[in-house]
Image (cartoon, rainbow, N blue to C red):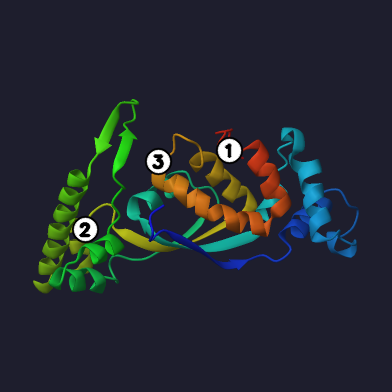
Amino acid sequence: MDKYFRIELLEQTPNPQRLIWRSAHQCVCEGPAIDDPAPDEEKAGEYAVKHLLAGDRGHWSPFEAPQISLNVIGFNHRTMQQITRHRVGVHFSVQSLRYTSVRFCEFAQNPTVEDLESLVYFRPVGEYRDRQGKRYTYTEGDRQADMALATQMLQHYARKIDAGYSEEHAAGLLPMDTRQHWVMSFNVRSLCHLLDLRSKADAQLEIRQLCELVWPHFEAWVPAIAHWYKTNRWGKAKLSP
């Protein structure tokens, strides 16, 4: 796992499994759902699994009620693109490359390997496969060459800023794997959708690692649902809800 990849909890709906219960209960009760006593959080989670999920019932709409917001830190721009390509019910607020340019210009004045890796993501040295399954090796020499090129790109970017280019114009010179931070919000259903698509074995390395870092927040928030998901859907590439 890249040392700069990090995901932190910002906000979340309290008692999310009870809210799912109330949302489902409103569909079948004569009066307002709020007038009926709700089970505790644990029992509500058991209800959600047994009556809404088990046996592939697929009654997903109540799972859209609770929301969770996460701060995604240090991931590369390309990983963010992979999420937005298949997003369903996901909110993004992404660090702008128009209003945040200082870190790149400061690096260009005094480049170091550590600072470069804090700004641009490089895959670890190792064995990889292309989309056709052919193996190849990414060597330390390959990585060093990529880092040297990225340093040149950032220095060229800084020269353009110094010459009066607008940040949005110069941003086109930044490496594709420039790190960006973003706020990402899901409901339970849309988070399951992301995990279905991106935790599977043929998803790209970085997005699988993002799912691994999201998982503890999901598990702590809706434990009964997370337990069911881990057993029945994690990594299995089932049709997404």
- Secondary structure beneath dot 1 equals loop
| Of callouts 3 and 2, the N-terminal one | 2
- Drawn side of residue 176 relative to residue 32, left or right: left
- Secondary structure beneath dot 2 equals loop
Badge 1 amino acid: Ser
Q: Which residue is mark 1?
A: 240
**Mark 1 nearby-residue class (10 Å; few <14, some 14–19, many ≥20):** few
Q: Which residue is mark 2?
A: 174
Q: Is residue 193 above or below residue 182?
A: above
Q: Please tell me which residue is depicted at 53% across the width and 47% down the height of the picture.
A: 88
Q: CA distance from mark 3 to mark 1?
A: 18 Å
Badge 2 amino acid: Leu
Q: Is residue 207 above or below residue 161?
A: above
Q: Which residue is mark 3?
A: 204
Q: Please tell me which residue is depicted at 86% across the width and 58% down the height of the picture.
A: 39
> Where is residue 129 drawn, in percent x and y?
33, 32
Q: Is residue 89 above or below residue 234?
A: below
- Secondary structure beneath dot 3 equals loop
Badge 3 amino acid: Gln
> Where is residue 52 drawn, in percent x and y?
76, 42
Q: Quadrant of the C terminus?
A: top right
Per the rendering, the mark at residue 149 is none
**Mark 3 nearby-residue class (10 Å; few <14, some 14–19, many ≥20):** few
| Of callouts 2 and 1, the N-terminal one | 2
Q: Are marks 3 and 2 in contact (CB under 8 Å)?
A: no
| Of callouts 3 and 1, the N-terminal one | 3
Q: CA distance from mark 2 to mark 1?
A: 34 Å
Image quarter of residue 97: bottom left
| Dot in front, 3 or 1 | 3
- Drawn side of residue 202 relative to residue 155, left or right: right
Q: Please tell me which residue is depicted at 64% across the width and 52% down the height of the picture.
A: 188
